[in-house]
Amino acid sequence: MSEILTIAMPKGRIFEEAAELLRKAEYKLPPEFDESRKLIIDVPNENIRFILAKPMDVATYVEHGVADVGIAGKDVMLEEDRDVYEVLDLKISACHLAVAGLPNATLTDVAPKVATKYPKVASSYFREQGEQVEIIKLNGSIELAPLIGLADRIVDIVSTGQTLKENGLVELEHICDITSRLIVNPVSYRMKDQVIDELVERLSKVIGG
């Protein structure tokens, strides 16, 4: 009997795409897997345990070893800087990080205010551009910040651009492309190398990596 592999997965869109990817890699996940509201789901026939978490928490679970591997967006990896191995680009949940704002807004401040839930990424980006900005950390509804005068610009994830459009905002600068990555706890990689290597190999075949 092979050892149990614990995988941390984010809820939402990434979860759905990752579950489909695992099925294509011939992991037999039960039909009710997708509808389950449980936070821990055991799949005994595959010797896998899934932990469902908020996207920003997946890398934390993997770093601390409560999960052997995880699926995390590159945006999380750039922002969190966790002690994990990034072993595979899963090429799912593609989007990008961008600077956005009101279309005709003039930036008169010496240090424009930028609202974001990615303060580290935003600070680094504007520093590289030679711009001095004031970062305002928000956890949600980032698009609201320019509309109520809290910030001049925002840095956020853009997928279709529909949310920006609906709130009267436009994309001003493209920062970087984002996809979901398979990440591994360094200790688990040594202790469970065979089962993790098998996971990587099976997923690689499916995504053409």
Image (cartoon, rainbow, N blue to C red):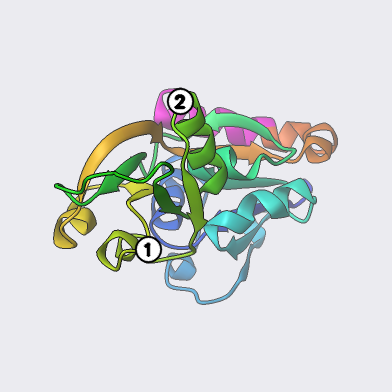
Q: Give residue 150's mark.
A: 1
Extreme bottom residue here?
37
| Mark before the other along the chain sequence, 2 or 1 | 2
Q: Residues within 10 Å of mark 2 (few under 14, many from 20)?
A: few
Please report the residue visible at 57 percent of the width from the left and 42 percent of the height from the top: 120
Q: CA distance from mark 2 to mark 1?
A: 22 Å
Secondary element at tag 2 = loop
Q: Amino acid at mark 2?
A: Gly
Rendered view: 199 above or below 47: above
Please report the residue visible at 42 percent of the width from the left and 32 percent of the height from the top: 206
Q: Give residue 6's mark.
A: none
In this rendering, the count of numbered labels is 2
Labels 2 & 1 near each other (Cβ < 8 A) = no
Q: Is residue 76 left or right of residue 164?
A: right
Q: Give residue 130's mark.
A: 2
Query: Where does the magenta region start and end?
Result: 197-209
